[in-house]
Amino acid sequence: MANTPYPQSYYAASANPVPPRPALQGEVETDVCIIGAGYTGLSSALFLLENGFKVSIVEAAKVGFGASGRNGGQIVNSYSRDIDVIERTVGPKQAQLLGHMAFEGGRIIRERVAKYNIQCDLKDGGVFAALTSKQMGHLESQKRLWERFGHNQLELMDQKRIREVVACDSYVGGMLDMSGGHIHPLNLALGEAAAVESLGGIIYEQTPAVRIERGANPVVHTPQGKVRAKFIIVAGNAYLGNLVPELAAKSMPCGTQVITTEPLGEELARTLLPQDYCVEDCNYLLDYYRLTSDKRLIFGGGVVYGARDPANIEAIIRPKMLKAFPQLKNVKIDYAWTGNFLLTLSRLPQVGRIGDNIYYSQGCSGHGVTYTHLAGKVLAEALRGQAERFDAFAGLPHYPFPGGQMLRVPFSAIGAWYYSLRDRLGF
Ligand SMILES: Cc1cc2nc3c(=O)[nH]c(=O)nc-3n(C[C@H](O)[C@H](O)[C@H](O)COP(=O)(O)OP(=O)(O)OC[C@H]3O[C@@H](n4cnc5c(N)ncnc54)[C@H](O)[C@@H]3O)c2cc1C
């Protein structure tokens, strides 16, 4: 049987020890079968187990194999499109509910880390960096918007102030969110998996769901077994393929790449990011970076529509890093990897139910560390019969990409090229 390892990343190289998790052999029965052990699946499992459900997770590769174990590690609040866009799309009532949930994911992560003693290098503080005065104006209105929804750990920074927290001369200002921050993403996933198992949940690794038998008593089929369940949660996100065809039509896997330097040493690291905050810029195709606990710089950026793996990641990302920090020109890159996130046309999450008992959440379009933790809670509430918050997400409209499965990649790339040109020209 296939044994899919983690990609060679800094995270895999610095992962906390894990127990063996055998593949499913034979038939098992449970209350909820979750497909995928990323944050969506693990967060759902934890909330369900805490509420007395029996849970089994089938994971095609390993816990955190997907985006959850490869991402930039940035705890970013709200959604990939902000609450004002949601207000315009679905109206004030639904936007109220979604707006108040926009800051919950970060709190859930912190609660999980504290409750289950998860060792994942959690640090507070995230910076949104503006490259133009237009972007700064956007941050000013974002602060007003977020404060309207009760979020007030925000500080606007002028050019002088941002230079105190990021040694990059490109920024005209920014916004500091002290409820943002960063984590070692794979170790967060591994800690959550251990918490799932401590509550009696079972995780089968190297166990892809190959078919879902729908109906009153759904069954998840795997290469050497099956799981009979009352409910199924589909949490495979960008790695799901065509297992649920109606979901694949309205979303598109995209790749994004990350590099990690050699350890920089305390002194150099402190000159780059003196407060150890993480940073993302405000461009449409954004750059994001932060320090690790052993003082490397992790730098990510760029998008490959359609999720083909680029041949030379360092050649793509290193110039972006050197543009922000020319002082790193002699620094070696120790790791470079790619990972897939799932884009929707609206860039809002795709949430819903198929029939009576198959639930899904996916497609948070690049900003998913906080949202996926919230999603687990909202899905668990729905399975317990409290669907108001689930319905608010499920009511978000979703559309197929222009060009269909054949042409969605070039069409989206043209769209992104247009927006990044606007960023470069500053309008
Ligand atoms: C390189 C990169 C950087 C990012 N940086 C950030 C960031 O800094 N901040 C932020 O907020 N967001 C970031 N994101 C997005 C964020 O990581 C994701 O939104 C989030 O992790 C998605 O979690 P998930 O559980 O839904 O999916 P995933 O973590 O992708 O998990 C899905 C899991 O399902 C499994 N699976 C799929 N199909 C099957 C099947 N048929 N049977 C069994 N298992 C299956 C996969 O193997 C995988 O383990 C980044 C994404 C990438 C790729």
Image (spheres, helix red, strand yellow):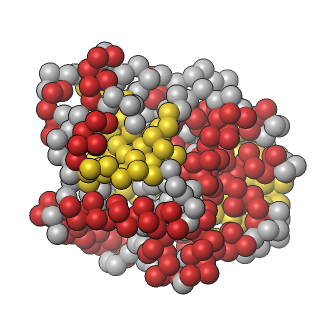
Locate residue 115, reporting x and y percent: 73, 35
Q: Which picture quadrant has residue 260?
A: top left
Identify the residue shown where x is 57% and y is 22%: 16
Locate residue 3, reporting x and y percent: 54, 33
Identify the residue shown where x is 50% and y is 33%: 123
**Figure check: 173 above or below 203:** below
**Figure check: 319 above or below 287:** above
Locate residue 116, reporting x and y percent: 71, 32
The C terminus appears in which quarter of the rendering?
bottom left
Left or right of 352 in this view: 309: left
How many labels sit on residues? 0
- Residue 319 versus residue 23: which sits nearer the camera? 319
The N terminus appears in which quarter of the rendering?
top right
Identify the residue shown where x is 15% and y is 27%: 327
Q: Which picture quadrant has residue 85?
A: bottom left
Left or right of 352 in this view: 89: left
Left or right of 353 in this view: 52: right
Locate residue 408, reporting x and y percent: 33, 71
Q: Which picture quadrant has residue 392?
A: bottom right
Can residue 371 be seen in the rendering of this structure? no
Can residue 166 be seen in the rendering of this structure? yes
**Figure check: 339 above or below 122:** below
